[in-house]
Image (cartoon, rainbow, N blue to C red):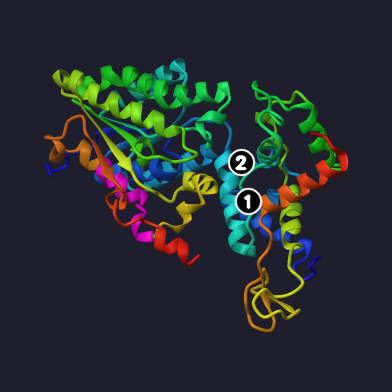
Amino acid sequence: MKQDLILEQRVLEEVRKAISEGIDINPASVKPESSLMKDLGAESLDFLDINYRLEQTFGIKMARRSVLDHMEELFGEETAIDSDGKLTDKAAEVLAIRYDGSGYKLNAGMDMDDLPAMVTVSSIVEGVMNLLDTLPEKCINCGAQSWNLHEETRIHCGSCGEVATFTSGDDLIEIWLKQVQENKKIF
Amino acid sequence: MEKDFFTGKVALVTGSSRGIGRAIAMAFARAGSNLVINHSKAGGSSRKKAEEVCREIERLGRKAFVVQADIGLKSSVREMIALISGWYGRLDFLVLNAARAPFKPIERLLEREIRQLVETNFIGNIFCIQEALPLLGASGGKIVFISSLGGRFYNPAYPLGSMKAAMEVVVRDCAESFAPRKISVNGICGGVVKTDSFKVLRQHMEELEYIPEELCVSPDAIADVAVFLCGPAARGICGQTIVVDNGLSNRLYRPAWAGEQKSR
């Protein structure tokens, strides 16, 4: 369910903190529109460090694999990236749906190595928000419907104190891809 | 240990802006050596991290320089060695630590990923050995290769393991063929180390998260063995790759994480 205990502004602050600590830069230089690779100098290992920090902060599980990895797992090898490492037509179509309105230019034939540069501060914020919005209606431990905020970023059951569990990033991508496939029959 | 053995000597640690490489560089500095810190990508966060390592080494009263070089490119390796020769006029210890690989099953590697895997992790290390040989020969130098348990045991998403295995053979070969030049060559087979790379690996092999802390090895524990292998106390060790894993691989009959997983 859509949760309103942790607001987007708070998530942005935490993402900013995770990035500035992860790659050792001034938090003030981390703008919502900054590309982690192009503007902030992040490298592939840094992404995981940043994800790890966010997982610890919010008690969530960020996606281990990309949308493209999931696409290949669900719909077959080379459905997302061809043997030359280029984005397929179908993958471009799926990504265009996923990032609709974000202003990203995603074309078939793009090199897979150019994709990580599209990750921005606000795309990470959105990813975290989506995970937080998988907060279940009821506590899985006691069934109570009251959630509390602890230490500003952790959601606990207001009745029994159990920590909230969220859908994992990988599961969320899979669910989304299956929905897209059902509606659009891309693959 | 021979007093002041490491003082004034020079160590090059490839891939030393972070993780195990960084810990090794710091250990050599503490032992008294001057350092060359290497990283591969220009302009990224590694550069900054490498410079931070240098400053830390300088605070210990040693010298340190950063050289950006992709070891997979022979010309870059050649330039790096020329720079070292210019700065220090010598090279005593070459620690082959740099590695780069995708974490996915071998059958899913793209052609260019396979080539890059071999280029950095096999060919690149050999370039370093070849280009450093004249300087190492002049000083009776030491080479230490950083391998990992993935070169000996199955891991579902670790194609790098095959290159580690190949390099362990290179260690044996070179130890024998460089012996007349008084250059020693050995390796360290590291266990599960919780560095940045671990964060990648853990994404592909969830079980890793359940390995109890006491079976993980710290970067410093590996670094100390690297320094030991370059010192006079290791004079009898030749062509070996020493396992440094806090006992993880010794637990054949007591699966390392079975109990932990059940309580998940």
- Residue B164 spot, x, y in % from top left: 37, 32
Amino acid on which the number 2 mark rests in the picture: Ala
Report if residue B217 lies within the magenta region.
yes
Q: CA distance from mark 2 to mark 1?
A: 9 Å
What range of the chain is rendered magenta?
B213-226
Q: Position of residue A162 (x, y in %)?
A: 62, 76
Height in image: B96 above or below A130? above
Task: Specify the amino acid type for callout 1.
Answer: Ile
Asked whether the residues under marks 2 and 1 belong to the same chain, the reply is yes
User: Main SS of the magenta segment?
Assistant: helix
Q: Are marks 2 and 1 in contact (CB under 8 Å)?
A: yes
Residue at the spot x=26%, y=17% of the render?
Answer: B134
The residue labelled by disc 2 is A42
Location of mark 1 (residue): A19
- At a point 73% along the width and 66% down the height, the residue shown is A135
Dot 1: what SS? Answer: helix
The answer for which chain carries disc 1 is: A
Chain letter for mark 2: A
Q: Give the camera-side residue of B183 and A126.
A: A126
Front position in the image: B49 or B261? B261
Question: In the rendering, at what x and y percent does residue B223 appear?
Answer: 31, 45
Asked if residue B248 lies left or right of residue B72, the reply is: left
